[in-house]
Amino acid sequence: MVIEDYVHGGAELVLQVAVKFAYAIAAIASLLAIGRIVFTA
């Protein structure tokens, strides 16, 4: 997702941090789900 093309100024930095945070949460959730499948199988 390219935020720089749509948003400029202070909101750009805030949105970039928010998107990175959302991706990090999604990555952690997927790792937890994979781990749960592996350890319960």
Image (cartoon, helix red, strand yellow):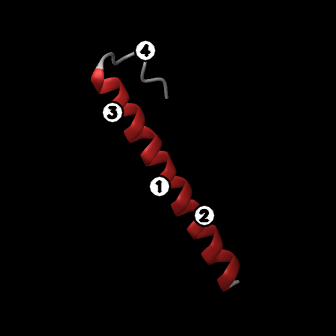
Mark 2–mark 4 contact, CB under 8 Å?
no
| Of 7 and 10, the residue lying toward us | 10
Mark 4–mark 3 contact, CB under 8 Å?
no
Could you give the CA–CA distance between mark 1 and mark 2, rounded to whole angstroms? 10 Å
Residue at figure coordinates x 64%, y 68% from the top left: 34
On the image, numbered disc 2 is attached to which residue? 31
Could you give the CA–CA distance between mark 2 and mark 4, rounded to whole angstroms? 31 Å
Q: Position of residue 25 (x, y in %)?
A: 47, 55
On the image, numbered disc 4 is attached to which residue? 5
Q: Position of residue 38 (x, y in %)?
A: 70, 77
| Of 11 and 1, the residue lying toward us | 11
* Badge 1 amino acid: Ile
Q: Earlier in the sequence, mark 1 or mark 3?
A: 3
* Badge 3 amino acid: Val
Query: Tag 3's secondary structure?
Result: helix
Question: In which image quadrant can residue 31 be found?
Answer: bottom right
Could you give the CA–CA distance between mark 1 and mark 3, rounded to whole angstroms? 17 Å
Q: Residue furthest bottom?
A: 40
Residue at figure coordinates x 43%, y 46% from the top left: 21
The image quadrant where one finds the C terminus is bottom right
Q: Earlier in the sequence, mark 4 or mark 3?
A: 4
Q: Position of residue 4 (x, y in %)?
A: 43, 18
Q: Which mark is residue 25?
A: 1
Q: Nearer the viewer, mark 3 or mark 2?
A: 3
* Badge 4 amino acid: Asp
Badge 4 crowding class, 10 Å Cα cut-off, few under 14, some 14 to 19, many 20 or more, is: few
Q: Which mark is residue 14?
A: 3
